[in-house]
Image: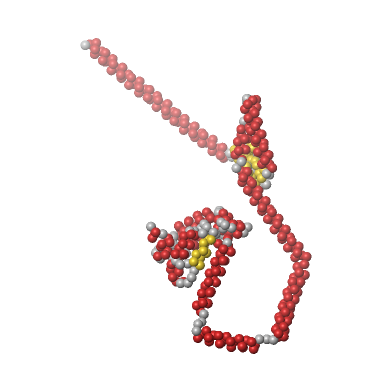
Amino acid sequence: AQGGTVLARTQEGRLGPYRAPPNLVLGGFAAGLFYFLQGRIEKTCENLYPTNPSVVKQGLARAIFRDSCDPGATGVIAAGGKLPAPRPLNELFAEFGGPVLAVQGVLDPLNDARGRADALEALGAKVVRIDAGHCPHDEQPALVAGPLREFAAKQLDATETAKAPTGQESEIIREGDREEAAEEKAEEPTEAELLQKEFDDLEKQLSALEVKAKEAADNVLESGKTGYMRAAADVDNYKRALAKDLDQVKKTSMAGALTGFMPILDRFEEVYGAFDPAATPEGEAKLYGSYHALYGQLTLGFEKLGMAQYRAEVGEAYSVLRHEKTQEVESEAKKGTVVEALAPGMELGGTIIRPARVVVSAGMPEPPNAEEEDLEVSQEAATEGEESEESDISSSGEKEGVVGEEKEGGKGKKKRRGKKTKRRRE
């Protein structure tokens, strides 16, 4: 069983050749994966940084969602299925041949992080396991940077040790170093020359700073008060837009929560609407009163949250957003207008929570024109004529049947009389 694992096949180089799926299958899978992931962008970003979710900057999920709305986004995901299969790790390690360090976040939710770390370690890599997700260098940069520095320093020391000369080569190098030191000492500038050079450098820096200061002053004079006012206006507009967006998000979320309470309010109104104080016993009447008080407290709480009733007016145009059409009747009122308001609607900051229930006019039926009336009259006359002919035919048939029966009856009587005469003779 161990020989069939991904780790064993990777170590032994027994992974099969890659075969890209058909475009139809790949496209369907990519579309399904895309729409599955698109609705979970924010949650996925949080899962990628399990130990330090604050790394996810504000607006990251919104930026990713905006890019995912590009018409070619699903094609990008589908194109990933056409990429060749990754080469086995043992093959890559054999070609590289050098030391390898792997800093692996073992809490990565997108793949088998611990299995990958074990596979790398089995191939001779130095593996450092840290509690981090898919991007450990962003989530825990200090924990990643430390092992990298130690590994780099160790490799540099090993390289310098390998290149260090010995014996006669070392003596030749030391002699050459002495000669170079003597030449450098002879070429060393005097203190006065050093001061002059430093002074010249400072003058160059001062000249460059004067040029930059002049350019900055010119820019300030050019922009002046107008530029400042424009920048201040842009900042103010941004703050207003941000506040408006936040308020709208708050109202939308609140409306979504209140929508779930609408069936409860409908049930309260239905039960109390059927309540008849005169025909209800005193005990049940008190129960109705208690439930009505609860209904009042519930609606009062909703009003404090900003929810308000609105009523449909008779004669106003029917709107699919603000009205729920329960019935459509013929009426002299204009077609498509409200003829009766049955129940009020609920809204929160312009967002409809429950539409108002109304009866809508279907208008009056159009009277038929003269040609249609003549055609109907002629059709009725033809129908009546056909019915009259059928009645005459059936009447004549009935008469013939009666006559036939009478004849057959006469023959029967004659036969019976003949039999009686014969008996008498006998």
Q: In the rendered image of this protein, does residue 292 appear above or below residue 303? A: above
Front residue of 417/67: it is: 67
Front residue of 163/168: it is: 168
Q: Residue at x 38, y 22 (%)?
A: 402
Q: Report if residue 283 is visible in the image.
A: yes
Q: Residue at x 54, y 37 (%)?
A: 376
Taking the view exactly as shown, the residue that stands out farthest to the left is 426
- Give the colouring mode of the picture: secondary structure
Q: Position of residue 209 (x, y in %)?
A: 73, 75
* Quarter of the N terminus within the rendering: bottom left
Q: Is residue 404 left or right of residue 385?
A: left
Q: Residue at x 51, y 79 (%)?
A: 163
Q: Position of residue 338 (x, y in %)?
A: 65, 40
Q: Position of residue 224 (x, y in %)?
A: 77, 67
Name which quarter of the figure residue 64 lies in. bottom right
Q: In the rendered image of this protein, does residue 280 appear above or below residue 215? A: above
Q: Is residue 79 left or right of residue 2?
A: right
* Quarter of the C terminus within the rendering: top left
Q: Position of residue 177 (x, y in %)?
A: 57, 85
Q: In the rendered image of this protein, does residue 88 appear above or below residue 419? A: below
Front residue of 48/400: it is: 48
Q: Report if residue 41 is visible in the image.
A: no
Q: Residue at x 51, y 36 (%)?
A: 379
Q: Is residue 380 left or right of residue 348?
A: left
Please tell me how many numbered marks the rendered image carries. Answer: 0
Q: In the rendered image of this protein, does residue 24 appear above or below residue 191? A: above
